[in-house]
Structures are given as structure tokens and as C-alpha cells.
Amino acid sequence: MAHLRTSVERINSDENSSSLTSFTPLDKNGRLVEGGIKEHTAQCIENLGNVLSAAGSSWEDVVKVNVYLKDMDNFSAMNEVYEKLLPSPKPARTCIQAGKLPNDVDVEIEAIAATC
């Protein structure tokens, strides 16, 4: 039986805030972007895209996305942006309402990419 060796490396991008430890809607200066759930979702996707690029990957390599919403009533607005910005076929996704997100933001997104 072959064993698959993997490594885990923390990667960020110069395009993102150096204080970015989770993919929340923070701009390059570490400030919450203006707007509501649509703008915040777009910023999370942009931040993740920057990290994927820095890792030599892209959204096309993403196999799983987890979306954490402060309020599930924002699902439709978040989903509208998600559908527009992510390539097809869309990766598998889980979306849940979280009790409290970092810095009390309204959305956090994480992604798992697979590369060969």
C-alpha cells in the first residue's frame, strides 16, 4: 500500500493584511471593508484567491468550501456573490450559522484545495 506524504504550510499573500489569520472580510490594511454581506463575501473570496495564487493554486483546484454566516438570513445575498465569483463546477460547500465570528464579522470563508 502506497503512503501519501503531505505537508502543511501557512501561506498568506502580500495582497492581504499580514494580520489575516482567518478569511474574513478584511482589506490589505486589516480593516473591515465597507458594505454589507455581498461586499464582505466578495472580500473573503478575494482574500482566499490571493492565498491560493500565492500557493501556486487557484479556485479551480478548490474541492471544499466552508462558509460561516453570522445570520443565515444572509444566505441568499452571500450565495449570489459566491455563484458569480467562483468558477464552475463549484466545489462542495457547507454553510452554517456560527454563534460568533472573529472580530464580530458577518461572514468567514475557508477553502481546501487539492493539487497533484
Image: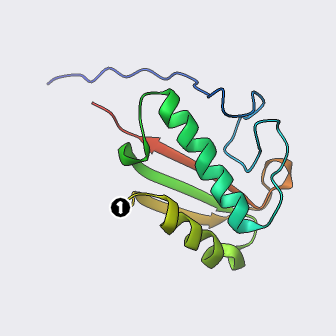
Q: Residue at x 72, y 48 (%)?
A: 24
Q: Residue at x 65, y 51 (%)?
A: 44
Across and down, in percent, residue 112 comes to 46, 43
Residue 52 in the figure: left or right of residue 38: left
Local SS, label 1 = loop
Please state, as top left, top right, bottom left or bottom right, where the N terminus lies in the image.
top left
Residue 51 in the figure: left or right of residue 63: right
Which color scheme did the rendering employ for the protein?
Answer: rainbow
Characterize the local packing of mark 1: few (<14), some (14-19) or many (20 or more) Cα atoms within 10 angstroms. few
Above or below for 28 versus 75: above
The total number of labels drawn is 1
Above or below for 90 versus 13: below
Across and down, in percent, residue 77 comes to 65, 75
Across and down, in percent, residue 115 comes to 33, 33
Please state, as top left, top right, bottom left or bottom right, where the C terminus lies in the image.
top left
**Which quadrant of the structure image shows residue 29?**
top right
Q: In this orientation, which residue lies closer to the viewer: 102 or 99?
A: 102
Residue 49 in the figure: left or right of residue 88: right
Residue 71 in the figure: left or right of residue 103: left
Above or below for 54 versus 103: above
What residue did someone put label 1 on? Answer: 88
Q: Residue at x 57, y 47 (%)?
A: 110
**Which quadrant of the structure image shows residue 14?**
top right
Three-letter amino acid code at the position of disc 1: Ser
What is the residue that sits farthest to the left in this orientation? 1
